[in-house]
Image (cartoon, rainbow, N blue to C red):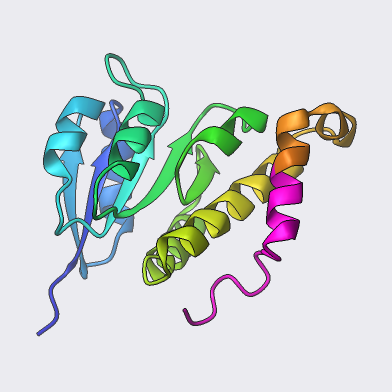
Amino acid sequence: MRRPTSVVVVDDDEDYRQLYKLWLPDEYEVIEAVDGRTGLQCIDDATDAVLLDRQMPDLSGETVAEKLRQRTVTPAVVMISSVKPDVDILDIPVDSYLRKPADRDTLLSVLSTVRSRCEYEAKRRELLGLADRRATVADAVRATALAESDTYQRVVERLERHDVSLGGAVSGP
């Protein structure tokens, strides 16, 4: 029998933690963390994925994401935030970025996609996460602002240099 998929939900808002727990099917084992510090303590090598709030007191989701990427084994990380995506999310080391309130189908689809990317070698996974965040930014930010952003232009050039797009991102490793 296959073990359940372990998901740590790190969010200071109890309503969101409970909502995600309700949305995830029985094959998911959900562990709740009320803040970033507790989340880091709950996340271990058996954790398959993390749903991570961006704005939390004490230790932000951005800091948690950075600390997770320094570990040798890193779960799939989906940042879910009420903060409108901007160019700054390109620097956050997460596999995907969703805006609250995300709907159940989107959450489950993104969770499945980022989990499958964990099978890729680290560099490819990093580039696919960057491509995902770039697409999120492109949908949320005015084209003129993107054209003026050095950070955004560097990301586009990096992705083009590595020939990375999200079109084939979900296919096999």
97 inside magenta stretch: no
**Left or right of 117 in this view: 142:** right
Q: Can residue 86 be seen in this view?
A: no
Q: Which residue is drawn at 49% across and 82% down?
A: 172
**Left or right of 144 in this view: 37:** left
Q: Quadrant of the N terminus?
A: bottom left
**Left or right of 86 in this view: 92:** left
> Residue 143, position in %: x, y?
87, 36
Where are the magenta residues, as a range?
A: 155-173
Q: Quadrant of residue 34?
A: top left
Relative to 70, say whether 61 is above or below: above
Q: Which of 91 and 108 is in front in this view?
A: 91
> Residue 114, position in %: x, y?
44, 61
Q: Which residue, as the protein is rendered here, is positioned at the far right?
A: 144
Q: Which residue, as the protein is rendered here, is positioned at the far top?
A: 58
Q: Which residue is drawn at 16% across and 69% down?
A: 4
Q: In which quarter of the image is residue 11?
A: top left
- Examine the residues drawn in magenta and state their main secondary structure: loop
Q: Which of 94 and 79 is in front in this view?
A: 94
**Left or right of 91 in this view: 62:** left
Q: Which residue is drawn at 60% across and 46% down?
A: 133
> Residue 139, position in %: x, y?
74, 44
Q: Which residue, as the protein is rendered here, is positioned at the far front?
A: 161
Relative to 136, say whether 113 is above or below: below
172 inside magenta stretch: yes
Q: Is residue 3 visible?
A: yes
